[in-house]
Amino acid sequence: MVLIVVVDRDGYRDSYDGKVGLIDSIYYATVTLTTTGYGDITPVTPIARLVNAFIVTPLRIAFLVVLVGTTLEVLANEGRRIMRDTRWRKRMKDHTIVVGYGTKGRAAVQTLISNGVKRDQIVVIDPRATAIGDAGNDQMAAFHGDATNRTVLRRAEVMTAREVIVTTDRDDSAVLVTLAVRQLNPNAHVVVAVREEDNVPLLRQSGADAVVTSSEAVGRLLGLTSVSPNLGEVMEDLLTYGEGLEVAERPVLGREVGKPPSAVPDRVVSVVRDGKVHRYYDSNVSVLAAGDKLIVVRPAKETPWAERPGADEDDE
């Protein structure tokens, strides 16, 4: 529009000095398109008035359509988001929050899903838009933002979450997230991944129930593979879900009560009694009791204990 006015500047009259230059054209285009219109610069020739009628007026209408349409779109999107959040919060309880949807976060989510956790009970928080898009494509609720911000955690309903898994890229961020989560939900089970072993005590003091040192674990696996490739292959097999062997936790069956761990068909590694983990050879768990849980090594595609032939209510 500035170009149109400059080319046909003789068809316009400026009440200030009678002439219309480049600056006057910019000014006229601005106040005209925005429908402000002070009337100090006006078209006076028939051609200029026809240009205003058939070119400038459609431009003005288009400007208003874009302005109003964009505003309505933003308001509508925000309204839909608020409604979705409200419906989601009403049904969300005892869910799992995963902070960070990178390599570690994806692996954690896949393991949860493989162990029976429903996708609609998993919520992802990540500051990267691409990660939020990936979580949405994986059919999970996702919130874009920094989990060290309590507002973001509240949006994810951390107050009613059963478990929070923290897989941030930096250990200092993991500490801040853990402190924020523990402040908002003292009862949630918090599992944190860190890079450095030195930060484990700090994470535990911050309220983490379990801390996994990713770099140390990878280093041990590398060392085992270097010393014994066969041992490294077995360890990798145990860490890979859905193939070969797997480590799993299951309750003691009714017919196993009163027997030693060695009599259980599965290969028992540890026994969990009263919340404490005992090694299978510990004299305190030489005989299995009702309510115990077993950490076992079994074939990955083995039938779950509750679906096995002979499993009944007494077993449960």
Image (spheres, rainbow, N blue to C red):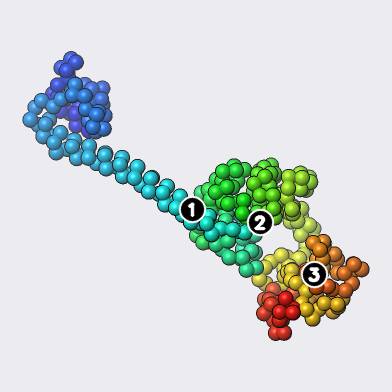
Q: Which mark is residue 86?
A: 1
- Residue 174 in view of the camera: no
On the image, the x and y values in percent for residue 97 come to 61, 55
Cα–Cα gap, marks 2 and 3? 22 Å
On the image, the x and y values in percent for residue 262 come to 86, 76
Can you say whether 281 is above or below 307 in the image? above
Q: Which mark is residue 163?
A: 2
Is disc 2 placed on a helix, strand or loop? strand
Is disc 1 placed on a helix, strand or loop? helix
On the image, the x and y values in percent for residue 243 come to 67, 72
- Residue 80 in view of the camera: yes
Identity of the residue furthest to the top in this view: 17
Q: Residue at x 21, y 21 (%)?
A: 21
- Of 170 and 158, nearer the camera is 158
The amino acid beneath tag 1 is Thr
- Of 90 and 38, nearer the camera is 90
Q: Which mark is residue 292?
A: 3
- Of 227 and 192, nearer the camera is 192
Of callouts 2 and 1, which one flags the residue occurring earlier in the amino acid sequence?
A: 1
Q: Residue at x 65, y 68 (%)?
A: 115
The amino acid beneath tag 2 is Glu
On the image, the x and y values in percent for residue 105 come to 62, 56
| Circle 3 Cα neighbour tier, 10 Å, few/some/many (<14 / 14–19 / ≥20) | some
The amino acid beneath tag 3 is Asp
Cα–Cα gap, marks 2 and 1? 21 Å
